[in-house]
Image (tube, coloured by chain):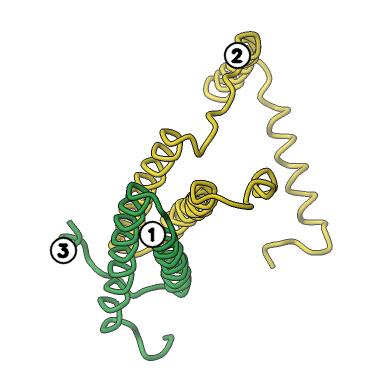
Amino acid sequence: MHNMMHHQPLSGKELDYISDSISNEDLLVKQCAVAAHNTPNPAVQQLCNQMLREHQQHIQMLTQSLQHHQSIAPFQIQ
Amino acid sequence: MYSQQQGQQQSGGVMQDKDMLFTILADLKRTVGEYTTATTEASCPVVRQMFMDLQNHSLRMQGDLYKFMEQNNMYTKPQPALKQLIDKQIQQVQQKHQQTDQFVQQQLHGLGQSMPYQAQMNTTQQHSNSGKNPYYM
C-alpha cells in the first residue's frame, strides 16, 4: 500500500512527530522488558514479550520512514 | 490515577504486575492520542498512512492489554450509568437536534430570520480587528 503512494519531503512538524513517536515507543519497549523480567506470572511474561516485539516493530517502521525521506530532503529551504 | 494504587504496593508479585501493566496501559493510551494528532498534522500521504497504521495497531494493543487486565482482576470495570441519566441525555439530545435542524433550515433556505447570524459574524470580525493583538499578525 505504501509503495503506491508518493513520498514527499518531510515537514519539520512531521519530523518532530516521528521523533516523539520513537521516544514513546522506546519507553514502552523498556517498560515491557521490565515487566516481562520481573513478573512471576507466565501469562504476563508472554503478553509483555509479545508487546515488546510489537513496539520494536513500530520503532523499525518509524526509523524506516526517516530513512526513506533522507534522500529527498532538501539541503536548504528555497 | 496512580494514588488509588499507592497503598497497595507493599508486597506480592500480583500487585507489582498490576502496577506495571497499568503504567504500560496509560502510556499506550497517551501514544494512541499522539498518533491521532500526528495523523491530522501529516502532509506527506505516506507519513499520514504510517501514523494511521501505528495508531490502529496501538489501539488494538491497548484493547488487548485492557482485556487481559480485566480478565485477571487487575482492572475494575467501570460502574454502569443509571437509566435515568441516559433518559435525560436522550431528551437533551432530541431538544438540541430540533434546534440545530431549525438553524440548518434557516441557513439553507433563508426561512425565518437569517440576519442575526450575519450580524453576529460581523461583530465577531470587528472585535478581532479592533483587538490590540490580532492573532493573524
> Which of the marked residues, 1 or 3, is nearer the chain's N terminus?
3
Choose mark 2 or mark 1, whichever is in front: 1
Question: Percent position (x, y) of residue B14?
Answer: 49, 46
Question: Percent position (x, y) of residue A58?
Answer: 32, 63
Q: Chain of mark 3?
A: A
* Amino acid tagged 3: Asn
Q: Residue under circle 1?
A: A36
Q: Residue furthest bottom?
A: A75
- Answer yes or no: are tags 1 and 3 on the same subunit: yes
* Amino acid tagged 2: Ile
Q: Residue at x 46, y 75 (%)?
A: A12
Q: Residue under circle 2?
A: B86
Residues at circles 3 and 2 in contact by the CB criterion of under 8 Å: no
Question: Which chain is drawn using green?
Answer: A
Helix, strand or loop under label 2: helix
Q: Residue under circle 3?
A: A3
Please state which of residues B34 and A28 is positioned toward the viewer in this rendering. Answer: A28
* Amino acid tagged 1: Ala
Q: Quadrant of the C terminus of chain B?
A: bottom right
Residues at circles 2 and 1 in contact by the CB criterion of under 8 Å: no
Q: Chain of mark 2?
A: B
Helix, strand or loop under label 3: helix
Q: Residue at x 45, y 59 (%)?
A: B38
Q: Is residue A7 left or right of residue B2?
A: left
Calculate the distance from the C-alpha at mark 1 to the C-alpha at mark 3. Answer: 36 Å
Please state which of residues A72 and A43 is positioned toward the viewer in this rendering. Answer: A43
Question: Which chain is drawn using yellow?
Answer: B
Helix, strand or loop under label 1: helix
Question: Percent position (x, y) of residue B46?
Answer: 28, 62
